[in-house]
Image (cartoon, rainbow, N blue to C red):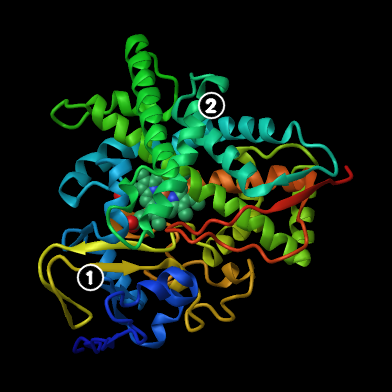
């Protein structure tokens, strides 16, 4: 039988309307970033933007996103968002160019091996317990701040299990200043603004210095004792490639900063959004409570409970669909090429947005509805469609770590507490390269046993 040749899909390209002289689309992107980006597929599959002097393309079709993310030498890490992040992450796994990536990923992958997760999950459970221990019935908390502290404590603990909680305080504080600073800096319209001697910029530089000194001290301490603490730093110190070469102290420093920053804000934002979605959807929340009452009966969740918590897991997947923390990402074109039949020049920035894809009504029916049960029938969407963790060689190395943490935290907290954002205005995201909620208060109500 002759082989059936499938027609090559034709992809449309266009320039987004509404560019202003000189500034182009930058004001629209800054003013209403999420709505602006989510509206781009209406103009084409590959949409060109002018951001001040820069030209950028946005891949709006899942197949174009798949091609972008699986050809990591043609579309390398770089461009608008990445260049700012590199100032802080250095040449760690998330920001290094493709040429350095294979070696780094091979060296670091064992730190996230399935067998290590139960150990990390035990540390996560301890940090969740420590976070909720001071909570009293009727308390009001700044919820994103509480989730951020929890996520920082978890990442710091899994990185440096041997480091005591009090001693890691400077680490938490500087990680906080830095993650928020990077997010804001990425959105700055003009180059150089991040070098002005403003209090914010000074705070940012001080935090970067503290983070460097603290991690350097920890690396020195670990090297001196040579013990395997079953944590991420122990794996980094023991990693060796085929030639017996390990990571240098400078490389380890960049990886530590990468894990701390890449692993914290993302998971914290997922948790904060999950609480707002559960409060707005009481029927889902009731079913969640029923699942937790059956499986946990009021006790904290453990790693071995995960298979028995399918609704909790679907709540996390659906939260990541509606509010993917890494919502706008970029690549740089290394050699002139074509994407979807359209020429893109070397040096061009190509943006892609999980948020845009996840809100397309043709990919996810009723896209704005929080419906965890859609994952009962859409367990494996086509590649490029659902990308909260990216895709291809640069896919998130901490995906299972992050979802495990989110499921354990939601399960343990919701088993004992009802979390209700204080009524008022709807929770809005900050204007940043990460989709994180602005501060909001929530009331904690203890559930009857
Ligand atoms: C819900 C939580 C998380 C989300 C939504 C998330 C999202 C992402 C995304 C979208 C990427 C790909 C970026 C790109 O293609 O440009 C990525 C990469 C990465 N993430 Fe995550 N992440 C999460 C948790 C974590 C955790 C817990 C860690 C570490 C402890 C981590 C470490 C990394 C690293 C090192 C990379 C770079 C991987 C590479 O280039 O090989 N992430 N993450």
Describe residue 256's horizontal placement relative to residue 441 as left or right. left
Q: Quadrant of the C terminus?
A: top right
Image disc number at residue 215: none
Say which residue appears at 16% left-offset and 25% top-offset: 244
Q: Is residue 396 something one can see in this rendering? A: no
Q: What is the x, y in percent for residue 198?
A: 40, 44
Tell me which numbered mark, 1 or 2, is placed earlier along the sequence: 1
In three-dimensional space, the C-alpha distance between marks 1 and 2, rounded to whole angstroms, equals 42 Å
Secondary structure, mark 1, is loop
Camera-side residue: 289 or 206? 206
Q: What is the x, y in percent for residue 263?
A: 45, 43
Say which residue appears at 33% left-offset and 40% top-offset: 109
Residue ID for mark 1: 53
In the picture, residue 343 is in which quadrant?
bottom left
Residue ID for mark 2: 169
Q: Is residue 239 above or below residue 47?
A: above
Q: Is residue 76 something one can see in this rendering? A: yes
Q: Mark 1, residues whose alpha carbon is within 10 Å: few (<14), some, or many (≥20)?
A: few
Say which residue appears at 78% left-offset and 66% top-offset: 283
Q: Quadrant of the N terminus?
A: bottom left
Question: Closer to the camera: disc 1 or disc 2?
Answer: 1
């Amino acid at each position: 039988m002759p082989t059936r040749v499938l027609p090559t899909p034709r992809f449309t390209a266009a320039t987004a309307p509404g560019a202003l002289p000189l500034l182009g689309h930058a004001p629209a992107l800054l003013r209403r970033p999420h709505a602006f980006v989510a509206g781009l597929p209406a103009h084409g599959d590959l949409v060109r933007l002018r951001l001040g002097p820069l030209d950028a393309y946005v891949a709006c079709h899942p197949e174009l996103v798949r091609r972008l993310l699986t050809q990591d030498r043609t579309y390398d890490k770089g461009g608008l968002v990445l260049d700012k992040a590199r100032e802080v992450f250095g040449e760690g796994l998330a920001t290094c160019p493709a040429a350095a990536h294979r070696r780094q990923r091979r060296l670091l992958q064992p730190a996230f091996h399935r067998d290590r997760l139960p150990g990390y999950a035990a540390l996560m459970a301890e940090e969740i317990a420590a976070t909720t221990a001071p909570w009293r019935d009727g308390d009001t908390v700044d919820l994103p701040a509480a989730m951020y502290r929890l996520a920082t404590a978890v990442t710091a603990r899994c990185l440096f299990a041997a480091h005591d909680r009090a001693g890691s305080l400077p680490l938490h504080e500087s990680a906080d200043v830095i993650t928020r600073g990077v997010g804001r800096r990425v959105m700055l319209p003009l180059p150089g603004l991040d070098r002005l001697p403003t209090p914010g910029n000074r705070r940012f530089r001080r935090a970067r210095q503290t983070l460097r000194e603290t991690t350097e001290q920890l690396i020195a301490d670990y090297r001196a004792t040579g013990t395997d603490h079953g944590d991420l730093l122990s794996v980094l110190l023991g990693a060796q490639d085929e030639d017996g070469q390990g990571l240098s102290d400078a490389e380890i420093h960049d990886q530590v900063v990468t894990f701390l920053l890449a692993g914290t804000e993302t998971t914290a934002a997922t948790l904060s959004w999950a609480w707002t979605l559960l409060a707005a959807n009481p029927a889902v929340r009731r079913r969640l409570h029923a699942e937790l009452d059956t499986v946990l009966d009021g006790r904290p969740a453990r790693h071995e409970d995960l298979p028995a918590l399918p609704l909790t897991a679907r709540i996390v997947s659906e939260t990541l669909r509606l509010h993917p923390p890494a919502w706008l990402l970029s690549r740089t074109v290394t050699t002139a090429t074509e994407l979807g039949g359209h020429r893109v020049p070397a040096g061009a920035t190509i943006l892609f947005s999980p948020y845009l894809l996840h809100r397309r009504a043709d990919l996810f029916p009723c896209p704005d509805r929080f419906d965890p049960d859609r994952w009962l029938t859409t367990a494996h969407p086509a590649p490029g469609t659902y990308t909260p963790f990216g895709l291809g060689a640069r896919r998130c190395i901490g995906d299972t770590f992050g979802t495990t943490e989110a499921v354990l935290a939601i399960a343990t907290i919701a088993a004992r507490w009802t979390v209700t954002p204080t009524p008022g205005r709807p929770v809005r995201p900050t204007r940043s390269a990460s989709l994180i909620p602005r501060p909001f208060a929530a009331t904690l109500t203890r559930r009857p046993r």
